[in-house]
Image: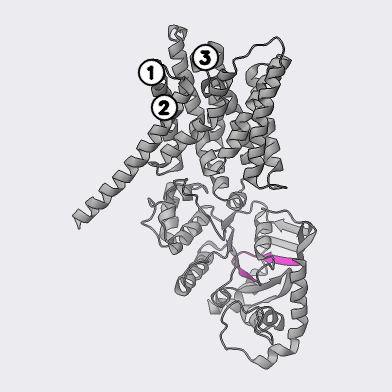
Amino acid sequence: MPDSQAALPAEAGAAAPLVATRGLAFGRDGQRILWDVDFAVRPGEIVTIVGPNGSGKTTLIRLLIGAEAPTGGRLERRPGLRIGYVPQRLAIDYTMPMTVRRFLALSGGTAAEGVRALERVGIPDLGDRQMRALSGGQFQRALLAQALMRRPHLLVLDEAAQGLDQPGTARFYELVGELRRELGCGVVMVGHDLHVVMAASDRVVCLNGHVCCEGPPVVVSAAPEYRALFGLGTRGAFALYRHEHDHVHGEACAGGEGCEGDAAGGRRAG
Amino acid sequence: MTLLDSFIWRAAFAGVGVALAAGPLGCFVVWRRMAYFGDATAHAALLGVALALATELPVAAGVTLAALAMALTVSAATGRTYAMDTMLGVASHAALATGLVSVSFLVGVRIDLTAYLFGDILAVGRGDLLVIYGGAVAITALIAWRWDALLLSTLNADLATASGVDPGRERLALTLALAVLVAVALKVVGVLLITAMLIIPAAAARAVARTPEGMAVLAIAVGAVAALAGLAASWHLDTPTGPSIVVVAAALLVIANAGAVLAGALTRRAGRAGR
C-alpha cells in the first residue's frame, strides 16, 4: 500500500465525502469530550484515528455511526449511506446460541452472500461454528464478514484488531486494505497498535478532544503535536507503545511543549 | 366447540397459549438478563387487578396498564441513584406489597388472592382463553416481526444503530410484550410464577439449541410440555396446578442440561475412538 499513500487522498479529494463533520462537539454531564472536530472520509480512503486513552476516539466513532447525537457543530452523512461497523468489543452472552452463519444473516444479505463474505475474510469453513467457540482472530474476521454483509459504503472499525498478536493484526489490516480496494469503500479505523495501523492508512487524524494534527502517516508521525501526545518527545508520559527509533530526538523537543500543554488541557476537559 | 366445554381442555389450551408467548419472549429475558425486570413487571399485576376492580375496567386491561407503567418507570429510573438490582428489588417488592394492600381496601369485592398469586388454570373460562390467545398471538407476532432487529440490538446496541436499527425502540417493543404477557399468564400461573414461565423454558432450551430461532421454538415446546404434564400431574396427585407446571418445567431444564452434558461426553468419546 505504500504506493497509494501519496496518490489516494488527492484522488479521493474530488469525490464527495461519505461522512463529514464541521466544528463537531460532544459533551456529557457538563464535560466536553470533543470540540472543534473537522473530519471527513471519502470513498476509497482509509483514515485512522489515533490518540491517547480518553481522547474521544470511540466517542467520535459513535457519533459517526449515529449512536450518539452531536451537542454542537455539524455532522453530515451522505444520503443512503450504508455503514459496516466492527465494534471494539462484542460480548456474545453464553445464554445466546449463535452460529457464525446466523450472525452474518442478522445484518441482511442472502445465504450465498454469507458464504462469500466468510470466504473473503478467510474463514470459509466456520459457518456452522458457534460464535463463542471462535478464537480471537476468527471472531474479528467474523465481525468483519458481518460488516461486509451490509455492502458498505463506509467501513468503521473501532480497535477491531484488539487482542490479536502482531502478525495477526498486520494480516487483519492487510485484509482491510484489500477490501477497501475491492469495494471502493471508505474506511475509518481507530487503532492502538500505532505502528501497524499507521502503515495501513492513507491519512491519520491525531485526536485529543480536538484534532491535534492530521495528514499522511509519515507527516503525522513526525509532527511535534503527535510526538508530544505519544511520548516520543521529551517526557514520554504517554508512551503507549514501544516506538521504533526511527526519529530524531532533537526535532521533537522544538515544538513539543505547545501540544503537551494542550494534551493536559484535553485530559482535564475529558 | 364441545372441547371447550370441558374445564380440563380449557386449562390445557390456556397453558399452551401461555407457553406460545412466553417461549420467545423468555429467550430475550434470558439473553438480556431481565429476570428481575420481569419480576417487577409481573408483581405490578396485583395493583392492576385492584385498579380494574375499582374502576370496572376489564382485569386484563388493568393488569396490562399497571405492568406497562411499572416497566416504563423502572427502565426510566434505573442507573440514576441505585444499582440496577437494588432498584428492581425495591420496585418488585413494593409493587407486590402495595398490590396486596390495595386489594384489601376494595369494599364489597371478595377476591381469591391465592388465585391471583399462584394462578387458577382450572377456572379458565372462554373469555379468559380469548384474552390468553389474543395476547399470545399479539406478542408472538410482534416478536416475529421485529426478530432480527431485536437480536441485533440485544447483541450490541451500536452494531444495531450502525445497521439502521433503533435499540431504544426495540427495547420498548419488548417492554410492551412483557406487559401484555403478564396479563396473559396471570390466570394460568399467577403473579409470583410468571417469571418462572418466562425464564425456565428458555433456559432449558438453551442447553440444546444452536441458533436463537431454535432456542425460541424449543422454549415454546418445553413450556407447552410443562403446562400439559403439570396439569396432568396436578390432576392425578391433587397438587396446585400453577406450581406443578413450574416444577415440571424445572425438571425439564435439569433433564435438558444432563442430556447435553451426556451428549457432549459421548461425542468426545466417539471422537477419541475414531482416531
Instruction: Name the residue beneath numbered marker 3.
Output: B124
Q: In the image, B111: left or right of B5?
A: right
Q: Secondary structure at mark 3?
A: loop
The question of residue A39 being in magenta is answered with yes
Tell us which disc is closer to us: 1 or 3. 1
Q: Quick one: B80 or A93, which is closer to the camera?
A: B80
Q: Chain of mark 3?
A: B
Kind of residue at disc 2 = Ala
Q: CA distance from mark 2 to mark 3?
A: 17 Å
Q: Report helix, strand or loop for mark 2.
A: helix
Q: Which portion, as a residue range, is magenta?
A: A37-51
Q: Which mark is residue B237?
A: 1
Q: Chain of mark 2?
A: B
Check disc 2: other Cα within 10 Å, few if <14, some if 14-19, many if 20+. many
Instruction: Give the x, y percent position of residue A31.
Output: 78, 61
Q: Nearer the viewer, residue A117 or A266?
A: A266
Badge 3, how many Cα within 10 Å: few under 14, some, many 20+?
Answer: many
Question: Which secondary structure type mostly characterizes the magenta part of the structure?
Answer: strand
Apparent side of residue A220 relative to residue B224 in the rendered image (left or right): right
Q: Label 1's element?
A: helix
Residue A59 percent coordinates (x, y): 68, 61
Q: Earlier in the sequence, mark 2 or mark 1?
A: 2
Disc 2: which residue: B226
